Amino acid sequence: MALLIISTIALTAALLSWCLSTWLRPTAAVGLALFAAALISPIFTARPHIFTLPIIVIWTAMLFRAARYEQRPPLWLLALLVLWANLHATFTIGFVIAAFAGLDVLVRTRLSNPVLLGKWVAFGLLCPVVSLINPYGIKAILATFTVAYGNEAVPLIIEWKPFDASDQPFQEVGVLLFVFALLVSRLRVGWAKALFIVFALHIYLTHLRFMYLFFLLVPIVLAAEIAEQYPALSLAKWVSDRRDGLERFFAERFYRICGVAGVLLVGATAMLTSAYQVEPSQKTSAKEALAFVENNHLSGNVLNSYNFGGSLIFHGIKTFIDGRTDQLFLNGFMKTDAETGRSGGKPVLEAQLKKHAIDWALLTPDDSRIPFFDELGWKRAYADGYAVIYTRDR
């Protein structure tokens, strides 16, 4: 899994470099891609959204490229959307990106090519239709509205919280550098692309998890304008420059060298992951604590800290709460669970333990409910630096 995630991240950076190098000189394209990849590193986790990053890069680049050349959107992108819909719920963002690209076409043609506009409208209508090819059908699309318009779980989940400069200083620098560059460069873009940039920045500042929409996609959208208005950064200028023999050697074999470097990188990663055991941190896996559970045959309903949800699922243990909070743990559940850890929450916790017939609890050492378990007379059966287990004192 570690190798797969690393390879996907590397593929995302490579695709972004390739898309940018259509307009920008290779050094600028690769440098900008690596900088963007570094800025979104907080979301590099072993979760399905990682596999959508290469898709969203291709989707955005191909649509805005078609818009720039006043062409119809490539129909093969619909197959990519189907894959996206079966990987992660963010596929509905693809509809929005397509709409902005279509708006760019409208700005460029000014209704002078109704046939082309009709093809873009048809493509836009096909997007939600083909995305229904997933195990959940229309529910996968409706899930976006469940989150976008807020529910009780969203304010309690860290990745859904607004951008916090004190917690993300590196990303703040990235945003400020972008604003500074726009102010001093006087870069001119059409209002359709300007609206897309505002949208990407808004959704990032609103929900931290969407930082990749801004840092990955804005460079793609602006690359053509940068190359046009600043020829020194363009691919055309780089191609026309005179080079010595060594430069020509690398320029003529650039893609082959990148391919070989990629293969070597994956090979080296595979060797490292096989030589050194890769496993989840006990902060989320509670490996030793769950070994204790198995050895002592603890059974029945568990109350767990949020971070241990995934590990419990992996071990086939039904969770009290896990990462599916914004979809499954609603109708007052999340609010009540949050109240159990607040000051004066002992009666609420006691009621929850009875309501859900809890037999044991798996908590992080800093879980604010631990004093309540002690006061309620539960037995501390296990404790280490990562997890604490309580059992009902029978």
Image (cartoon, rainbow, N blue to C red):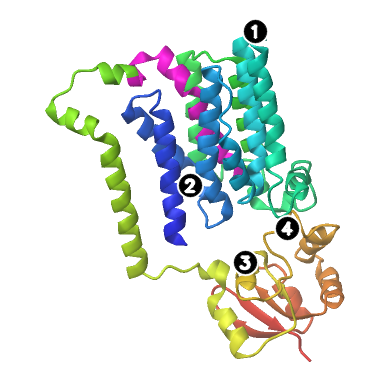
Q: 53 and 198: which one is in front?
A: 53
Q: 49 and 162: which one is in front?
A: 49
Find out whether residue 230 is within the magenta segment: yes
Image x and y of residue 239, in percent: 27, 20
Mark 4 touching mark 3, by CB under 8 A?
A: no
Q: 352 and 311: which one is in front?
A: 311
Mark 4 touching mark 2, by CB under 8 A?
A: no
**As displayed, is residue 238 above or below residue 354?**
above
Question: Looking at the magenta stretch, what is its main secondary structure?
Answer: helix
- Which amino acid, mark 4? Thr
Question: Magenta span covers which residues?
Answer: 209-235
**Tag 3 residue:** 310
**Tag 2 residue:** 41
**Tag 1 residue:** 112
Q: Nearer the viewer, mark 1 or mark 2?
A: 1
Q: For numbered disc 1, what is the local secondary structure? A: loop
Residue at (69%, 20%) from the top-left corner?
118
Q: Alpha carbon of mark 1 to alpha carbon of mark 4: how far?
A: 48 Å
